[in-house]
Amino acid sequence: MANKRMGTAQAAYALGQETVAPGTAAAADRRLSSEITITPTSTVERPAMQRGWGIRTPASEVVTSRGSTWSLADGPLLNDDIIHFLAMSVAGSMTVAGSNPNVWTAARNILVPLVPDTYTIWRSLSAADGTSFYQGVKCAHAATDSWTITIPSQGVCTFSASGFAQEPVDTTTDATALGLATGTRYLAASQDAVIYMDTSWAAVGSTKIGGEVLSASLTYNSGLTPLYTMTDDGGGFGYSDISYNAADNGWEFEMTALVEDADADLFATCRTAASAQSLLAFRVKLPTTLASRYVQISFLARITDAWIDDISDDNGTQVVNIKCQETTDGTDAFEVVVANDQAAQTG
């Protein structure tokens, strides 16, 4: 048999907002810069039943659930990409104002039910010629259950996310993700990050933490979980009108900061707030390489523990790990503002 030359496939990942109805697949129109891993969660039951004399063996099978999970690999935080994951987890029907930049706002009040937007996730592979596609899949009715922004000690701020969707569907048509432009990518450097800490939502963004925080991370949990309901059209998650539930919505904020030889440093202030379980209002602003494009997260929190003493040695310097978790003042709780080049979630 003659040798066959094998080409190497190139992968691309994209999203499409579902504007007709949740679960009605949308065309890919936003290419992503990080890899998405899709894991089918569909299950098959093969109960053991007697066949012949005294033999119990699987004799029949049936698909009992259909669905998938997905994860976006940790990669650079990009203000064009993040709005789609915010729409799937913080607030659907996000508001946008202005032009060049376009300023998007996703506000979350944990006392109000979450109604997210849904998307179709696309994965396309190209043939060696770079123009044809194969082994493409799409997953409709995608929602986000968790995402994390990481601000390292030195480097580029990163973003990762995970969620669930309907069962993957093979597709060889409309697999245009590889041909989509990615647009201008603005990076956010950790050294440019600014963190504010105040004591009320009205004052958030007033008091800057200066020169004490080494690194930080924020994890947001939407609380969304899939529901599997009885249907007559294929079954599985997202095949009926009621397809998900939001239970444990919240967030966790963590800072690693210097322990200074002063009674008024961040460590001392947070230790007092922990003991009293005082309400804290944080704002984390992440400017990009173009200052007018940024990601800004504001949220209310309380120190997780009643006493802070998670101190360690970092090359001879004493540092403390400070953990906070979600709270609300009854009205406000969590808000993300993104300034980018996108005028719409679709197109």
Image (cartoon, helix red, strand yellow):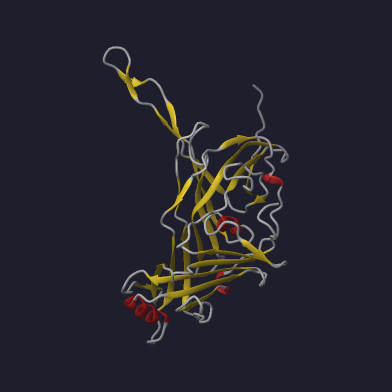
- Toward the viewer: 91 or 29? 91
User: Which quadrant of the view contains residue 345?
Assistant: bottom right
Q: Nearer the viewer, residue 337 or 71?
A: 337
Check the picture and name the quadrant holding the N terminus. Answer: top right
Please, is residue 74 above or below residue 286 in the view?
above
Residue drawn where x is 50% and y is 67% of the image: 334
Is residue 322 in sight in this rendering? Answer: no
Q: Position of residue 252 (x, y in %)?
A: 43, 64
Query: On the picture, is 156 further left or further right than 57?
Result: right
Identify whether 137 is placed above or below 258. Answer: above
Q: Is residue 152 left or right of residue 47?
A: right
Answer with the quarter of the image where residue 295 lies: bottom right
User: Foreground residue, 228 or 275?
Assistant: 228
Residue 118 in percent (x, y) is at 57, 49
Q: Residue at x 65, y 63 (%)?
A: 96
- The correct choice, above or below, for 24 with respect to 98 in the image is above
Query: Total marks drawn?
Result: 0
148 or 343: which is nearer to us? 343
Q: Residue 69 in the image: x percent, y percent? A: 49, 45
